[in-house]
Amino acid sequence: MMMKIRKVEWVVVVVVTFMLLNLSTCSAWFGNSKNKNGGRKSLFFYGDEEAMQSTSSLVMNLAGSSSIVFPLYGNVYPVGFYNVTVNIGQPPRPYFLDVDTGSDLTWLQCDAPCSHCSETPHPLYRPSNDLVPCKDPICASLHQSDDYNCDDPNQCDYELKYADHYSSLGVLVKDVFLLNFTNEIQLKVRMAVGCGYDQIFPASSYHPLDGILGLGRGKSSFISQLSNQGLMKNVVGHCLSAQGGGYIFFGNAYHSSQVSWIPMSSINSKHYSAGPGELVFGGKRTGIGNLLAVFDTGSSYTYFNSQAYQALISWLKKELTGKSIKAAPDDHTVPLCWQGKRPFRSIREVKKYFKPLALSFASSGRVKTQFEIPPEAYLIISNMGNVCLGILNGSEVGMDELNLIGDISMQDKVMIFDNEKQLIGWAPADCRRIPRSRDFSI
């Protein structure tokens, strides 16, 4: 039987996040949706008080050492996003979700029934009958203030609005996520998930996906819910391969000596942000400082504020003067592209024309830690064979002074967001090698 959900006619919850800022359009690249247990021990953990008591010893063992690793599929260009396969519901069904560290709530396009849904790779999610009440802490975390009213106290309505004018209206339910831990234990974990029954899709942000996997810092995020149930540490990380694919991980991980660490910014506590930072061109300081940077997998490309972007464009024009490449105004893949005497086939062919960038952050005292952005982390080769700049002007899309580090600039690095220690870390990595062992190193 289909669950009947009272649909609201007015906005109850508004959450503004930074995601899906992407100009690429193409068919999606999905992974295998088949679920193979591989001999795992299957256990139940429903996320309620009774289940907590019956599995308390298991939870104590899991909390300090457990982790989950999901393979990723997709790329920056031409696909335009990275997605993960998550099994949700009873019985569990696979859904392709866009991974987004820039927002909190995980939600699915939902048959409640659906008023406006896009094409999805799987049948629309059929919601459980377990509604999240309006005054639940997770519902409260989606509101902009503590002083909010409910049309129905037994139901949590929400509206999510993203920076590219994408939006989703829905209701919060609890359902079962089938999760395989690296210690070979399989759990059915009950968590809050959004049933999105009314979406608005601008053409530039449309992706044929089932929904979003929210990985931000708020209470409603996937990792926060797992951590609050005592299942693992509140740590999330990812490794995006420039060749496509990669992996995302949650919970415990052994931190290698190669990891560079900086503190999360107290200025922007809603996102994985760092700063103030200074822009570095070709190893030289620019004097362009006080830059607040948000690390966001919901964006294919990187965005600089107007001052930093204009300085970058001026520097690039100076560096390319006299070189055998010139502007390609007919290529509209992104705002700025260059063409050579013949089409380029890879970034390796154009690296000699471009120098590395970096953002320099204070890590402790006067010690500076640089987030390196080599040419392959800010350039793409378009379908026309031109080299294009994967850093865009954030001021033109309403981001004001914020700088956003998107997928392109996090490729071939393992990124770690440690919410318990309030640290952001990164290290060079081969992201094509997905960790399989119980105690994996990064």
Image (cartoon, rainbow, N blue to C red):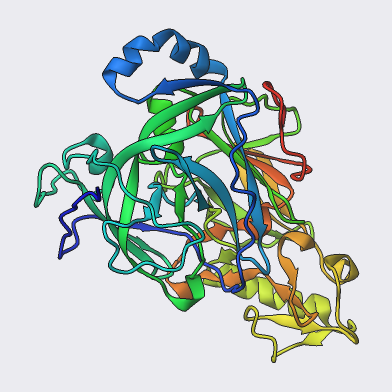
Against 47, residue 102 (above or below) is: below
The answer to which image quadrant residue 128 occupies is: top left
Against 306, residue 102 (above or below) is: above
Q: Is residue 399 left or right of residue 431?
A: left
Residue at the spot x=31%, y=47% of the render? Answer: 127
Q: Residue furthest bottom?
A: 330
**Where residue 88 appears, x then y in whole percent?**
43, 41
Can you say which quadrant of the picture contains the C terminus? top right
Q: Is residue 381 left or right of residue 129?
A: right
Residue 257 or 221: which is nearer the viewer? 221
Residue at the spot x=51%, y=69% of the render? Answer: 394
Residue 88 or 325: which is nearer the viewer? 88
Residue at the spot x=52%, y=57% of the render? Answer: 298
**Where residue 334 appears, x then y in whole percent?**
63, 78
Q: Residue furthest front?
A: 1
**Where residue 371 appears, x then y in whole percent?**
68, 49
Residue at the spot x=21%, y=36% of the render? Answer: 136
Residue 291: in sight, yes or no? no
The answer to which image quadrant residue 159 occupies is: bottom left
**Where residue 12 appears, x then y in whole percent?**
18, 56
Residue 277 or 273: which is nearer the viewer? 273
Against 409, residue 367 (above or below) is: above
Q: How many marks?
A: 0
Residue 362 or 77: which is nearer the viewer? 77
Q: Residue furthest top?
A: 57
Residue 399: in sight, yes or no? yes
